Image (cartoon, helix red, strand yellow):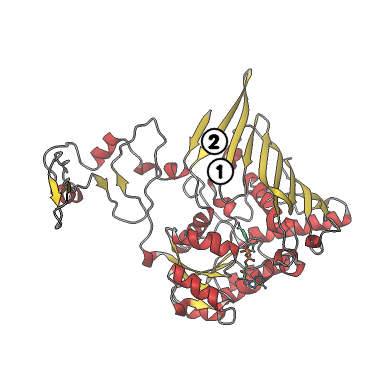
Amino acid sequence: MNTYFDPEKSRNAPFTMSRKGFLQTAGIMAVGAAGGLAAACESKGQNPSYPVATTSNYTSEGGQQVPSSPAFSPPAKVPGDFDKPIVLEEWKSDADRKPAPTPNPLPSDQRIGYAVVGLGHLSLEEILPALAACKKSKIAALVSGNPEKLKHVAQQYGVKPESCYSYETYDKLKDNPEVQVIYIVLPNSMHAEYTIRGAQAGKHILCEKPMANSAAECQAMIDACKKANRQLMIAYRIQYEPFNLYIREKIQASEFGKPKFIDAYNCQSSANPQHWRHIKALAGGGALPDIGLYCLNTTRFILGEEPTEVYATVYSDPENPLFKEVEEFCSWQMKFPSGVIANCATHYHVHESRKYRVMAERGWYDLDNAYAYTGQKLMTSRADGEMVRQENVSIMPKNQFGAEMDYFSECIIEDRPAYSTGEEGLQDQRIMEAIYQSARERRPIKLALIEKKDAFRGPRSFNQKA
Ligand code: NAD
C-alpha cells in the first residue's frame, strides 16, 4: 500500500481547490466565444473565453508556413502579494497526486542576502545551487582563500567583484548592506572564530554542523551573537526535511503508541588522511561529530526529549593511517526520560549506510537514506487484527539546504527566533563530550535531566512551516 503525504499541499490548503471551486473563486463560470481579449478580462475578474480552434497558418518572411493558434491565457488566480502562490487552471483528475503549488519566490530585492564562507564541497555541490533556487534567500557575497576559485564561482553565480572577500578582508562584510546572513561552511575548528567575527560585523549567522569543537566554543558563539543582537542558527537540515518531519509529527501524536526503542546509524567511507576531517585539531573528532551527529540530533529532534545517560564505545583500526588522530567507529546508547532507549552507531570506513528505525508499542517507522541529501525511503508497519499492514509512504521531496535557508530568512524577515538555535548545537556538543568520556572511562555517563520538551529549539508550528 502506498500513502502520499504532501506537506506543501497541507500548508497551502486554501490555495488547492477543485476546478469548480477554482472557477467560482476566479469568477469564471462560462467558457465561450473568441479569445483575443481573454488575458485582459481575466486580470479584471471578468470571464475569459477560450479561443475557438483555428486552422489558420503563420507565414514566415522566407515563405515557410506553420500552423497558427491565437495566444490565450487560461484562467489563473494571481494573489495580491508574494507569500501566496499563483493558482493555475487545473487539468488533472483526482486519480493522480496533485502537483505542489507553484513556487512563490519573493522579488529579488526583498530576499535575504547570504555571504557563503568557504568554497569547498558542501558550498559548491549543494549550498550555492540551492541558494540559486531559493524563494526568500539569495547569494550576495562569497568568502574564499583562493582568488582564482573565488573569481570563477562569483562569475558563475553573478556575485559582484566588490562582494568577494578573502579571510583577511572578511570583517569588511560589515560594510556590505546587501549581506544580512553569513553562512559558515568551513572546517569545524573555524566555526567559532568566523561566527564571532561575523556577529561583530553585524550579520546574522547560519553555521554548519557540528557547531564547533567544544561546548566552550559553542557558548562563546552564542554569547557573541547575543551581544551583537544577531540570530544564530545551526544548519541541521534534517529538521527541515519532510520525511523526518513526518516521523516526528506521528511520534508526537503517538500514532503507533509510545516509542520504545530507536536503532540509528550513519556510515560512510573516506580515503584521504590529509583531509581536515582526519586531523583532530580541525575536525574535533572523527565519525562522531561529522556523521554520527545526525543520529544524535535527529533522535533528539523526533522525540523532542533530551537524553539523561549515554554509554559509548569507540574503535579505530590501529594500522590505518586515516584513523591516527580521529575515531573510525563510535557506538553509543542513550536513555531518555520517557524510557526510550536509542542505539546509535557511526563508521568512517564502510560503504555508505544511513538509516534509522523507531519501534513503538504497536508499529514502527523505518527510514532509509534518513540522513542523505535525497532518496529517503519510508516504510511503516503496524498490527491490524490478524494482519500486519506495511506501507511505503511517499512524500514530495524538498531541497533540504534551500528549505533551511528559506526558513532562516523567514525568521529574519518576520523578526522571530530561529528554530535550530545555537543552544541546540551546544546541547549536541555537551552530549558528544559525554559520549567520548564514556568511551574513555568505559562507563555510563549521566547527563542533566531536562524535562521541558524541545528545550533548546525555537518556536515553530510544524503544520504550517516545514
Ligand atoms: P571541504 O573541505 O570540502 O571545504 C571546506 C572549505 O573551507 C575549503 O574548500 C576551503 O575553501 C575552506 N578552508 C579554509 N581554511 C581551511 C583549512 N584550514 N583547511 C581546509 N579548508 C579550509 O569541507 P565541506 O565538506 O564543505 O565541509 C564544510 C563544513 O560543512 C564542515 O563543518 C562540515 O561538517 C559541514 N558539512 C555539512 C553537511 C551537511 O549536510 N549539513 C555536509 C557536508 C559538510
Would you place residue 299 above or below residue 290 in this image?
Answer: above
Q: In which quarter of the image is ligand 1?
A: bottom right
Left or right of 19? Residue 123 is right
How far across and down, in percent of the image, does residue 445 sit?
82, 53
How far across and down, in percent of the image, does residue 454 sit?
62, 51
* Total numbered badges shown on the rendered structure: 2
How far across and down, in percent of the image, does residue 116 sit?
53, 69
Labelled disc at residue 393: 2
* In contact (CB < 8 Å): disc 1 and disc 2: yes
Tell which circle, 1 or 2, labels the residue nearer the N-terminal end.
1
Q: Name the residue under label 1.
A: 243
Quadrant in the picture for residue 119 = bottom right
Q: What residue type is labelled 2?
A: Val
How far across and down, in percent of the image, does residue 135 sit?
42, 58
Labelled disc at residue 371: none
Would you place residue 339 above or below residue 202 in this image?
Answer: above
Quadrant in the picture for residue 279 = bottom right
Task: For label 2, count other residues whose C-alpha is less than 10 Å away and answer few (under 14), some (14-19) or many (20+).
Answer: some
Q: Image point 19% across, 47% down: which residue?
A: 72
Task: For label 1, count other residues whose C-alpha is less than 10 Å away and answer few (under 14), some (14-19) or many (20+).
Answer: many
Left or right of 173? Residue 445 is right
Question: Real-space Cα distance between discs 1 and 2?
Answer: 9 Å
